[in-house]
Image: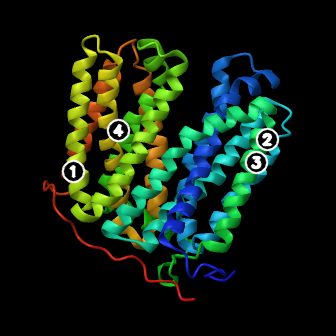
Amino acid sequence: MPNQPLGTRNLSRPEFIGLAAAIMALNAIAIDVMLPALPYMGKDLGVTDENERQFVVSAYMIGFGAAQIVFGPITDRFGRRAPLFFGIAIYLICAIAAIFVPSFWVLLGFRLLQGIGAAATRVVAMSVIRDRFSGREMASIMALVFMTFMVIPVIAPGVGQLILFAFSWHYIFLFMTVLAGSIGVWAWFRLPETLHPEYRRPLSVRTVLEGFRMVFTNRSAFFYGLNGMLLFSGMFGFLIATPQIFQGIFGLGPLFPVAFAGVALFMAGAQFVNSQIVRRIGTRRVTHFSIFGYIACGAVLLLLSLGSPSFWAFYVALMVMQVFFAWASSNMNSLAMEPLGQVAGTAAAVFGFMQTVGGAVIGTLIGQQFNGTLTPNAAAWMTMGILVLLSTLVAERGRLFGVGKEYQAAPAVAE
């Protein structure tokens, strides 16, 4: 397979952003598009316990989170394209197989495998961004990719519901198959091999362990990666409690999806703003400012939770906090990847594993503290913000709002 497939020489910046976002979106689609179908799937496959239906999502997330550790060193050895298409192939096969499953437990097995295939998409998407860009430009690209990616949770459940109006839940997996196949074809003809031959690393135990050592011993990279996990923990704790907050506390009823979609769209808009200001002000300055803003909003929400806040007081404070979350989260991913260009695949795998698995575990513990008030979530947001600040101080050796060292992107692959 040639390093530079036909048609990639003129891959524009907007197309690269769209393609990277589409590759990452395969993961979000595999979760969000099927949420409306869970009751129907459970009924058809004989699942009587409503909570067991959640395993359809959990099984996928376990495979997705754990397999990233494996795909990281593989992409640093064989390049970005081959592992990407291998992962998409697994994703497609499992989506097709899920249409014909005879039982719920077989479905869970295919969902676990589908998550393993999807792990390649996350690792490769992050790696190709680091391969091609560095510094403020990388942070801007990352923000735009995350902006596009964040629109998916808004659209996907509605798409799933539209499919269910006309067809059975099996057609959701067919939709997933067609979409993944289309994105795979797009990537096949347009995505170049971005890993320079000089950066390819042997796939041996010693080399793999050396790659992990480089990630874990780089102070700045590791602690910014840890920050991403802490921020995602607070967000995940909120996500699993959103029905109880929006419907239970504020009684929104059928307006809950509208309020939730508003949050996601606002975050997407914040990422667009971030992509513009980070190129002028600098990644670290925007990130560090966002940390303090995040903590301040957490404190406001905690104070509001001690009384009986109106929905709009809560919602406005939440929206402002999500601006700072959006800025901090994507920029921290950039700062974590920045010094590790030679092991970008391994770095993307480690940070992806930390944020997916670690964030989900901590976030679940946060969600379990829900007591009918906003206090547990508000306290978690403020606590996570303070921990992120402390971690950032370690990463930056106590100095905030600096510019940082400039790194270069990998040299272009020879055509």
Task: Give the mark toward the camera: 1 or 2.
Answer: 1
Depth check, front residue: 286 or 228:
286
Whole-angstrom CA distance, mark 4 to mark 3, is 34 Å
- Residue at 18% over, 50% down: 393
Q: The disc labelled 1 sits on which kind of residue?
A: His
Task: Give the mark toward the camera: 1 or 4.
Answer: 4
Instruction: Evaluate if marks 2 and 3 touch, with contact meaning CB atoms under 8 Å apart.
Output: yes
Task: Give the mark toward the camera: 4 or 2.
Answer: 4
Q: Where residue 353 sits: x, y (%)? A: 48, 49
Q: Where residue 66 sits: x, y (%)? A: 56, 48
The C terminus lies in quadrant: bottom right
- Residue at 59% over, 48% down: 27
Q: Earlier in the sequence, mark 3 or mark 1?
A: 3
Q: Which mark is residue 288?
A: 1
Mark 3, residue position = 94
Whole-angstrom CA distance, mark 1 to mark 4, is 15 Å
